[in-house]
Image (cartoon, rainbow, N blue to C red):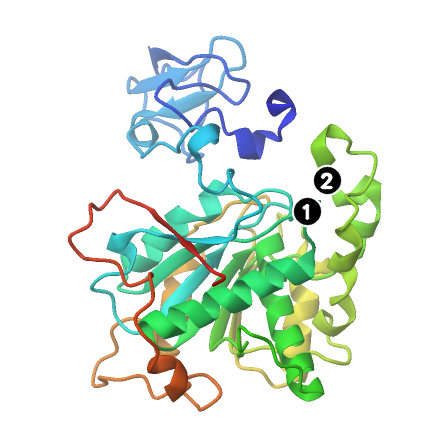
Amino acid sequence: MWSLLPHWISLQSERGRVRKCWEGHRLLRDKQDGRRHGECDACHSRPPAGSAVLACAGCKFTVCADCNCRPRLPPLETDPLFCGPHSPRLLVAPSNVAGMGRGTVIVCPGGNYEFLMPKEGLPIAEWLASHGIAAVVLRYRLLPHHDLEDALDDLDAAAALVRQARGGPVAAIGFSAGGHLVASHATRTERRRIESVHTRSRAKMLDAQVLVYPAIDGTPWLDPEKAGFFNRGDSSSLPKTAGALDTPTKALCGGDGFCAPPTFLVGSTGDTICPPREHSDIYAEALKEHEVEHTYVRKNMGEHGFALSQEWTHRAIKFLTNAGFGWVDGEDEWEGCSDCCDDNVRALAPSPLTLPEKAESGEIALVPVHA
């Protein structure tokens, strides 16, 4: 079954000690001669002539010297985003939390609600931490054994946990399906507020959200030909819990129930999986109509799944800083509204999220989000 996994999850070229291509063939040392090898398949830049590269003799997969030095992803069998799909956790690296400025960002990777994309997890938290913004990664529950409501419960609980541990503000950044999850959190929170639905997690609206190539229109998840589900190797049918993914579509597209915190939105015109005209453009228009503070970066940044890109990252950091995250000059304490910073929550005992600074920088703690 593992051999049937999507290549963007197996990521054989980026896992383990042995360098391999997408197909799992071992890469060999070579030099860029300008003829046999093209651009680097990792950074998409063309290595200088004569420079060292790793290349596949069969498929011409090439990695430049700089990308060869990047940290490797863990093997699938030990990847915390791949293992433990029934146990929601926060992945916390002490170096991404200890000594950071105000607020915390919860990273929600994409993966079509079946997997969690590793490039959209810890690397995102490390990028935020490099700018003084504390960040943790949420391993939320997935199809087919769980549905959208379960994943939203996980995000609710994660937000409550980080508020308990570090106070406010709290934001979430979501990629692809993770963007759908984050955006849906606001509509469900508002609906429950109106209906006076009380939950044990005491769900509150996030103080800000960052949505990167988000899936907004959930109707493709109802069509086996468009949904792109792995479904344990049976891509011709839908997972039994997939139908709930379309539930918030009307609200997310600006209909009754639309609600959102201040938003930073990213859409790539080169994206064929979540093209802006069908997803982020619609959400941007809804934000505008409902007079929600937002920034929309829309340009050709490549195909779906590009994750970090200088085309949007610098502006996102500025957006989060203006929203009260990280180190803000002239301010010593977050003065969030009563809906965002509850004194009773602040008064609770320290949570397991408060990790000792002396912990090793490479250590990742898996913190349960539900009591």
Question: Can the viewer see residue 221?
Answer: yes
Q: Toward which corner of the image does residue 67 lie, by quadrant?
A: top left
Question: Can the viewer see residue 176?
Answer: no
| Structural distance between the alpha carbons of marks 1 and 2 | 10 Å
Label ID, residue 143? 1
Q: Is residue 134 above or below residue 43?
A: below
* Amino acid type, residue under disc 2 in the picture: Phe
Residue shown at 52% from the left, 23% from the top: 22
Residue shown at 73% from the left, 76% from the top: 254
Q: Position of residue 330 (x, y in %)?
A: 20, 85
Q: Which residue is mark 2?
A: 229
Q: Is residue 300 above or below residue 72?
A: below
* Amino acid type, residue under disc 1 in the picture: Leu
Q: Position of residue 161 (x, y in %)?
A: 42, 68
Q: Nearer the viewer, residue 303 or 256?
A: 256
Q: Marks 2 and 1: in contact by CB < 8 Å?
A: yes
Q: Position of residue 274 (x, y in %)?
A: 67, 52
Side of 131 where 230 appears, left or right: right
Query: Tag 1, which secondary structure?
Result: loop
